[in-house]
Image (cartoon, helix red, strand yellow):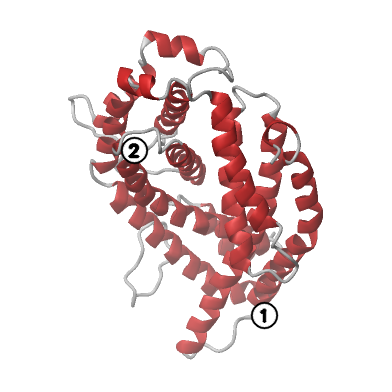
Amino acid sequence: MDDSAQSIISSLHESSAVRAPADNSPVQSTSPEPTTLTVVSQSSSPSAHERASKVADATPAENNAQTKRSSRPTDPMIVFAYECLRREFKDLVERKPADPTAPTADDVHRMRIAMRRLRVALRMFRRMLPRAAKDFRKDLRSFARALGEVRDVDVHTETFRSFAQTIPAESLADVGGYELHLRRERAEARNRMSETFGDDRFDELLAAFAAFLEDAPSAGAERRWRSFKVSDGVDKYLKKSLKRVLKLGRKVGTEAHDKDLHRLRIRAKRFRYELEFFASAYKSLEKAAAEAKTLQDLLGAHQDACTASARLADYARSLRKHGGGPMPAALARVAEAEKQKARDVRHSFPAEWRRFERSVTRGRIAV
């Protein structure tokens, strides 16, 4: 690649923590100033994050002993639920960025997944948990949304960067405007994330959740749910979730709306996490979880393509609105390539769905 080609895409390799220019000011191509994602308190006294880490690591001795072995179908479901919550919470704490002032795209991605898994666990076990669990789910959602906005732009950036590397030198000027537009979007998303995580609210939430898990379940909760076993949980939770996935997936045809495929992706992803939770008691569920992940990944590729197409369409409208003319030919090719990706996924979906359905409708969770 020649120097002119490298200059167009080089900024996409820079630190993702950038400062967005004012709406009416030109986007500068100079090196961006980092914004700060203030997650860990720098005071000398123990921070909320440190307290959360200590509680996540220092579980009661009996709980440590239980997490060292696989769960059993005859275990009380209430104990299993809290073991699951502890594992997912510990993973979330450990996914905090090593450098909180400049989280990488991978940091954002991993933290988002950990937060999503914890929210799925809270949702699945909600009937057995205290009311505070509902508030935790709600509070986590706002942080997850901020991470999701950044992740969406990062995914599109990576796709665009790959495309930019294939553009002939004479066409690079056509994508320069969009590259700067994309930088602005990335900066704004990062700044919103910094604002969301910029005070002590997240650390306080972690500390409160750690306290929520400490010494749980209570003796009263164990007595109330003692007859509800892990095997009963499979019937109540997994089979119900599977029915929802099958009902939605069987309605999806070649002409299905993009939103239907998106809803199925969300359901499949949630079902996959639930399968992985219960796989500690039923190893046979690991195969079904792998099939659910394959389906989720396929539908995720469709959603990424749709999101990219929508971003490019919005950019084209902004060009026309400001008298900039039609979308440059190079970007039009990107838009068409994304639409083709979505069509390819739709073409592949029936065969993948049949594999998934065969896998999950046999064995322990057959409905």
Of 182 and 112, nearer the camera is 112
Residue 172: x and y in percent read: 63, 71
Residue 100: quarter of image: top left
Relative side of 34 to 167, left or right: left
Quadrant where the N terminus sits is: bottom right
Residue 343: x and y in percent read: 74, 67
Residue located at (43% from left, 66% from top): 184
The residue mark sitting in front, 1 or 2, is 2
The residue at which mark 2 appears reads as 133
Crowdedness of circle 1 by 10 Å Cα count: few (<14), some, many (20+)? few
Residue located at (23% from left, 29% from top): 47
The residue at which mark 1 appears reads as 329
Relative side of 110 to 246, left or right: left
Residue 210: x and y in percent read: 31, 27
Residue 265: quarter of image: bottom right
Provide the secondary structure element on which disc 1 rests: helix
On screen, residue 196 above or below 291: below
Give the distance between the C-alpha atoms of the residues marked 1 and 2, in whole angstroms: 51 Å
Crowdedness of circle 2 by 10 Å Cα count: few (<14), some, many (20+)? some
